[in-house]
Amino acid sequence: MKRIVLSVIAILMSALSMARADTNIKQPNVSGQFYAADPRELSSQIDQFLQKASVRPSDKHIRIVIVPHAGYVYSGPVAAYGFKAVSQGNYKTIVILAPSHYYGFDGIAVWPEGGFQTPLGVVPVDQDMAKQLMAQDANFYSLPPAFEREHSLEVEIPFLQKTLKDFKIVPVIMGQPSFSLLEKFAGSLNKVIGDRQDVLVVVSTDLSHYHPDAKARAMDTLTMAMVKALDAAGIWEGNQQRVKIEMCGFVPTVAALLYAKERGLDDVEALRYANSGDVTGERDAVVGYTSIVIYDKQGFFTTSEKRHLLDIARKTMEEYVRTGKVLESQETNPRLMNEEGAFVTIHKNGQLRGCIGNIIGRGPLYKTVRDMAVAAATHDPRFDPVRPQELGELELEVSVLSRPRAVQSIDEIVLGKHGVIVSQGPWHQGIFLPQVATETGWTKEEFLRQLCAQKAGLPADAWKDPKTKIEIFTAEVFSEKDVRE
């Protein structure tokens, strides 16, 4: 009898736990209204939007994307530009900032756990980041009623599901907070994100509402110019008056621009603008839409981080050359924990002495630099292993690589800026770092001929062969000489 009672209790507890878990999965509010409820239809619709969005490939890293949130038939073609642009990135956490259309409150609501359901599946919440954010201020709190009817956050998720993989979200609905609270939020968001390069901020907003086409375009042009100028105060004040500009998501937009200033970002690009009249043909009362991206500042590493990575490479190389042992170390800087490709290059008296790396990161960056330092010193087949008596004559250089992307034409290659990878199948692959073009003075054609012949074991003109895959990447390159100066 006792066992039966215990079993019943266990079943009830399990059922309660499952029910509690289910309540943390936010069910969609506007599936079948703002976008298709059928998964195949929704997937196909987004695919069509993305195929038609003409986005120029870029090596820049996007930190913030501003996208519209109307029904997909109206704003989907514009939203596709922003989401297609971020599809080139490697993001693991997406912070979605959206306005409240239906529920009035003064603070900032965060969904702290569980996930969000769409016809394309459930996207999990980044519980750690959500709770860290909420811990920063009493006005950042869980408020489920703010999410009950809201569409502005929800409609961004299917686009994310179609353009990114293996990511989590931090869902944020903003009520009517003060400008000073948005400043606190921006500072808190910057603090919580820290040095992570895999966090994207998505801002959900439409532009002017229900004006004649000419007036709407004039208002929206001014609004977009203010966004490009990072004029958070101007957008805040302008939307209080609602005479010259309008944004239904001006609150999250202001928060994002304040966050951009916290990070020192100033590279803003408007990818697309249109209004509902461009879809319906009705020009008397239109709603404006835009996709805008804000890029990261160039150079992702501080001087101290560069110095630290070079120090890891130097100490590891010297220890291995002298004793055959690999130094073990623990790293706490999140920036150096990212999975990124890296090469270590060794020079002696200005001449190459070894260079080996991984194109794609296979573990924390600091460990990749450590391992490549050993490999460059002892396993580069072009050179004899480094001897202990040489160590004082060597200069180390570290190249941290962006994720490679395929090119359709060699016109996309910029010598001195891009490294290049050529490959045919699994057995023929070659890579030149960006600095090779600068050091050799080769033309683009000679650069590619040498890459095919020297590195990939292919005919020199294989770069012209349609079967040859050509990829480019950028690299942040720094040497021991650089950090001494």
Image (cartoon, grey):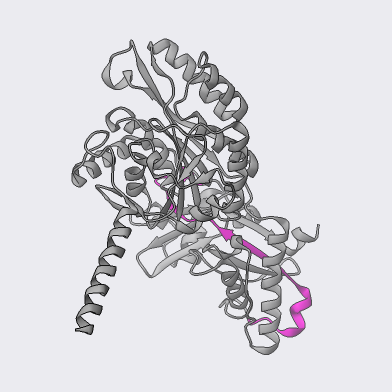
Q: Nearer the viewer, residue 187 or 219?
A: 187
Decide whether residue 398 is among the magenta residues.
Answer: yes
Tell me which corner region of the image, top left, top right, bottom left or bottom right, holds residue 184.
top right
Specify the quadrant that holds the C terminus: bottom right
Residue reaching furthest bottom? 323
Q: Is residue 303 left or right of residue 249?
A: right
Residue 349 in the image: above or below residue 132: below
Q: Please name whichever residue, 351 or 255, is drawn nearer the observer in this view of the structure.
A: 255
Name the quadrant of the N terminus.
bottom left
Q: Does residue 76 appear to the left or right of 268 in the view shown? A: left
Is residue 231 in sight in this rendering? no
Q: Do we see residue 88 in this rendering?
A: yes
Towards the viewer: 103 or 481:
103
Chain part drawn in magenta? 384-413
The image shows residue 46 at horizontal and vertical percentages of 28, 40
- Looking at the picture, how far across and down is residue 147, in whole percent? 37, 41
Count of numbered labels shown in the rendering: 0
